[in-house]
Image (cartoon, rainbow, N blue to C red):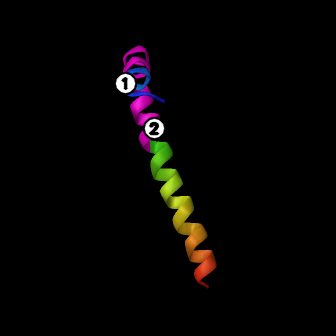
Amino acid sequence: MTPFLLQRIFELSGGQSLKANIALVENNAWLAAEIAAAFHT
């Protein structure tokens, strides 16, 4: 997505899209850590 589209979606969602995107990044980081830990053992 382009910065323009992200900004527009942010505006249209009243900021809720930013919260959703942050949660997505956090969950992806958690999952990556779980996968890395599984390969380490």
Look at 40% across and 17% down and name the residue there. 8
Which residue is labeled 1 in the image? 15
Give, as a three-letter code, the residue at label 1. Answer: Gly
State the image quarter where residue 19 is shown.
top left
State the image quarter where residue 11 is shown.
top left
Q: Residue furthest front?
A: 2
Q: Quadrant of the C terminus?
A: bottom right
Look at 38% across and 21% down and name the residue there. 4
Tell me the crowding category of disc 1: few under 14, some 14 to 19, or many 20 or more residues within 10 angstroms, Cα based. few
Q: Count the marks.
A: 2
Marks 2 and 1 in Cβ contact (< 8 Å): no
Give, as a three-letter code, the residue at label 2. Answer: Asn
Query: Percent from the top left, x then y, of residue 24?
Result: 50, 44
Which residue is labeled 2 in the image? 21
State the image quarter where residue 14 is shown.
top left
Q: Is residue 27 above or below residue 23?
A: below
Query: Who comes first in sequence, dot 2 or dot 1?
Result: 1
Where does the magenta region start and end?
7-22
In this rendering, position of residue 26 left or right of residue 37: left
Look at 37% across and 22% down and name the residue there. 7
Query: Percent from the top left, x then y, of residue 31?
Result: 56, 60
Look at 54% across and 62% down and name the residue there. 32
Query: Percent from the top left, x then y, of residue 36?
Result: 56, 72
**What distance separates the C-alpha of mark 2 from that of mark 1?**
10 Å
Element type at marker 1? loop
In this rendering, position of residue 32 left or right of residue 19: right
Is residue 24 located in the magenta-colored stretch of the structure? Answer: no
Query: Percent from the top left, x then y, of residue 29?
Result: 48, 57
Q: Residue furthest bottom?
A: 41
In this rendering, position of residue 23 left or right of residue 14: right
Q: Is residue 40 above or below residue 4?
A: below
